Amino acid sequence: MNLGTYSIGVGDRFAHQAKAQLEACILAQKAGLEVIPVWNKSNREHTIIGSEPSATRAAADAAAKALGWTRPYFCDADHINLSTVDRFLAPCDFFTIDVADYIGKAADPGSIDAFVSRHPELVGVTNLEGVESGIEITPALLRKTAEKFLFAVQEAAKIYRYIESGKGKGNFVPEVSMDETDSAQTPAELLIIFAAIADEGIPIQTIAPKFSGRFNKGVDYVGNATQFACEMALDMAAIRHAIAQYGLPANLKLSVHSGSDKFSIYPAICAAMKDFSTGVHLKTAGTTWLEEIIGLAESGGDGLALAKEIYAEAFDHRAELCAPYATVIDIDPSKLSPPSDVAQWTSQQFTSALRHDPHSPAYNPSFRQLLHVGFKVAAKMGGRYLDLLEANEAVIAKNVTENLYVRHIAPVFLGDQQGMDK
């Protein structure tokens, strides 16, 4: 089971927008490019919503059937570990193996010694095709990196083998995720990690490293875009080298987590893919939930009233809602309008504050981030929220498809910035 060159993680908190998301991939196909949809939803999100991974699979299958989609598509067990993977085994065929919590924990000293002895080729300067400067790894750096990452790779291998025992060899796409950690992995560290992954026999098709800068939920990249472009090129060069050196799968590519709305680095991602003749997996996760709120507000009436109510509840419980996402949001409390003010807003005022249009003076990143983490409020509403989604399906679907295609697929995979420059 192989993941295509270009793929996009399409999160759907409430499993109602699969058709609208797939429509965006159909638009890409009409533009001459195959972009494979991967529906992803984490164990934490399922727990908050009260849903099961089987519902994600059912929604994806129904969308593919309804729209006549005959190309591949996947369901991702997002950020799983050994304690959470079981509920995902049957319905999922893509597994994001998250080992960030194990980074920095020391492996058995003997296994570290053995790893260092097995890989003398890593010491010295490794010249990578496609980049100007080589990567230098000293014996001290090799050992230090093994001490930091080897245990995490060994844990990934345990999880991979457990999944393989349930799914069968070759019947799923494995990804290793190391993005939710304190510091970005350097290209040198990534080369060493690839050697360890190959030693463990994990046939990863995507890897999610941590990049420099901040990848906050639902808003643009915060950091040095030029530095990011250099990192992206070096990481892609490291992947190319690892495929040749260690026999990792030929379709191995980078996975960019929290990748939605990172408009300022999309040109760099697109350019790097062209330079290295490769693809990326872009995870867009919660951006669909925000488009649902935009669609409800745009529809007016009960939809707008409910959107305002969700904001008011999120505002009142912002500390509780923000705590689990503290490392991936930056909300300025002074920029959050009081719910009493928002209650008087028109539909246009609400949608203009929430929609991610960097050229609009009304766009409010703090307002958007609070609602991004506020899906728990809608989950508690149950049928009230879901009934309005269905009642306003047309306007919501239009927003979901347009956002995914114009703001994400087109600039990243097609190099088309037109929608972003309006």
Image (cartoon, rainbow, N blue to C red):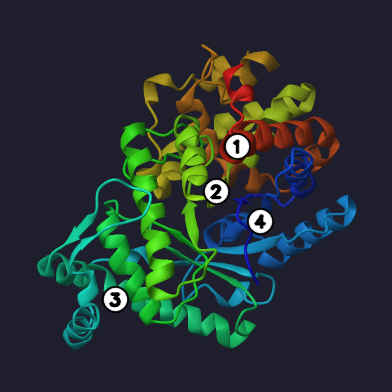
Measured Cα–Cα span from mark 1 to mark 2: 9 Å
- Amino acid type of the residue that numbered disc 2 sits on in the rendered structure: Leu
- In this rendering, the answer to whether 157 lies above or below 350 is below
Residue that label 2 marks? 282
Whichever of labels 4 and 2 marks the residue nearer the N terminus, that label is: 4
Query: At which x and y percent is residue 393?
Result: 82, 37
Q: Residue at x 59, y 39 (%)?
A: 287
**Are circles 4 and 2 on residues that touch, CB within 8 Å?**
no
> Dividing the image into 4 quarters, which one contains the N terminus?
bottom right
Q: Which mark is residue 237?
A: none
Q: Which residue is mark 4?
A: 39
Q: Around disc 4, counting alpha carbons within 10 Å, would you say few (fewer than 14), some (14 to 19), or many (20 or more)?
A: many
Q: Which mark is residue 408?
A: 1
Q: Secondary structure at mark 3?
A: helix
Of labels 3 and 1, the one closer to you: 1
Residue 220 on image: x %, y %: 46, 31
Q: Is residue 330 above or below residue 360?
A: below
From the image, tell me which residue sits under label 3. Answer: 151
List x then y, in percent, for residue 32: 74, 42
Q: Quadrant of residue 392?
A: top right
Label 2 environment density (alpha carbons within 10 Å; few <14, some 14–19, many ≥20): many
